[in-house]
Amino acid sequence: MAEQEQRLENTCCDVTIIHEDVIERVRSGMPAEEELFDLAEFFKVFGDTTRIRILYALFQSEMCVCDLAHLMGLTQSAISHQLRVLKQAKLVQFRREGRVVYYSLADDHVKSIFDQGYQHIQERN
Amino acid sequence: MAEQEQRLENTCCDVTIIHEDVIERVRSGMPAEEELFDLAEFFKVFGDTTRIRILYALFQSEMCVCDLAHLMGLTQSAISHQLRVLKQAKLVQFRREGRVVYYSLADDHVKSIFDQGYQHIQERN
DNA sequence: TACACATCTGAATACTTGTTCATATGTTCA
DNA sequence: TGAACATATGAACAAGTATTCAGATGTGTA
């Protein structure tokens, strides 16, 4: 509490809160902190070109780690690290066939999320 | 070229490309590199709790920088920096009224993108 | 069992990024 | 004009992250 007050002293408007009613109304309508945190964590996964490329590749076909590495022009290790991130986010799934591990998409929302993101980019340019 | 070959030597499968046909088919179906880069840049904006919170606040009401700072419990400077990011991504717009600058949403896709992200999180848990 | 091979993982490194601090800009009002 | 105030911005720092390297794990085969 005292800590937060102190922090606010550094802001421009430490004396007069301009629209206290608005702040309260908006505050009460905000989702829980944890949900917003999870959402940010989720979108963070899409904030990397390599992971976006992997997902776009998997839109077309299931692929093994080795093939993905060749396609991306990156080391197998780099791909494997990123696949772990995608796996943790439950965006991809895998099946093992002997020594080879095949990855595929595990989610239906991704494509339409990407489509809408793409649409935004198009419209703003 | 030579660089890429050298890099591939470090991968697991430098001799035998396992599914060359799959790689070629997928490669030819991939969107342009630049588009994927832009898409990653776009989603990177959503990969931060503060920016997500700002956007959720603006879903409810237009707000000035000072009010946002109070609502978030962050300095005016921090909010201003993040608003710049959102502005560059053309996700928010602003209007000036005297000394006060009011920010509001500038895009229709955001809410539905968030809804789908949220839906994914719910389903995976 | 021993070897080959596809994948995984931990540590190290280079790079990116969010916040703060100090200060600049731009607006209002006396 | 000058003081007060809301916002914007540049530099610095701390924290996070993507890739590489080296080596471990696990699977198939001779």
Image: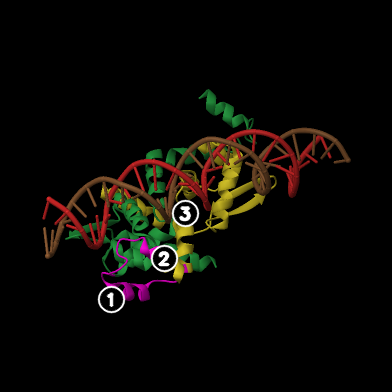
Chain colours: A yellow, B green, C brown, D red
Q: Which residue is mark 2?
A: A6
- Where A100 sits versus B73, above or below? above
Q: Earlier in the sequence, mark 2 or mark 1?
A: 2
Q: Which residue lies under the disc numbered 1? A: A21
Labels 2, 1: front one: 2
User: Are the residues under marks 2 and 1 on the same chain?
Assistant: yes
What residue sits 48% from the left and 49% below the top? A55
The residue labelled by disc 3 is: A44
In percent of width and height, residue B36 lies at: 40, 44
The mark that comes first in sequence, 2 or 3, is 2
Please give the chain letter of the residue carrying mark 2. Answer: A
- Write down the region rendered in magenta: A6-33
Please state the chain letter of the residue tagged with numbered disc 3 in the rendered image.
A
Along the viewing direction, whichever of A43 and B24 lies nearer the viewer:
A43
Separation of residues labelled 3 and 1 (CA atoms) = 33 Å
**Which residue type carries mark 3?**
Lys
Q: Residue at x 59, y 43 (%)?
A: A65
Neighbours of disc 2 within 10 Å: few (<14), some (14-19), many (20+): few
Viewer-nearest residue: B74 or C22:
C22
Query: Label 2 amino acid?
Result: Gln
**Position in image of residue A39 (x %, y %):** 45, 62
What is the C-alpha distance between the residues marked 2 and 3?
31 Å
Q: Residues within 10 Å of mark 3 (few under 14, many from 20)?
A: some
Q: Is residue B41 visible?
A: yes
- Residue B93, compared with residue C13, is above or below; it is below
Say which of A112 and A90 sits in front: A90
List x then y, in percent, for residue B18: 61, 37
Please report whichever mark, 3 or 1, sits nearer to the chain's N-terminal start.
1
- Callout 1, which amino acid? Asp
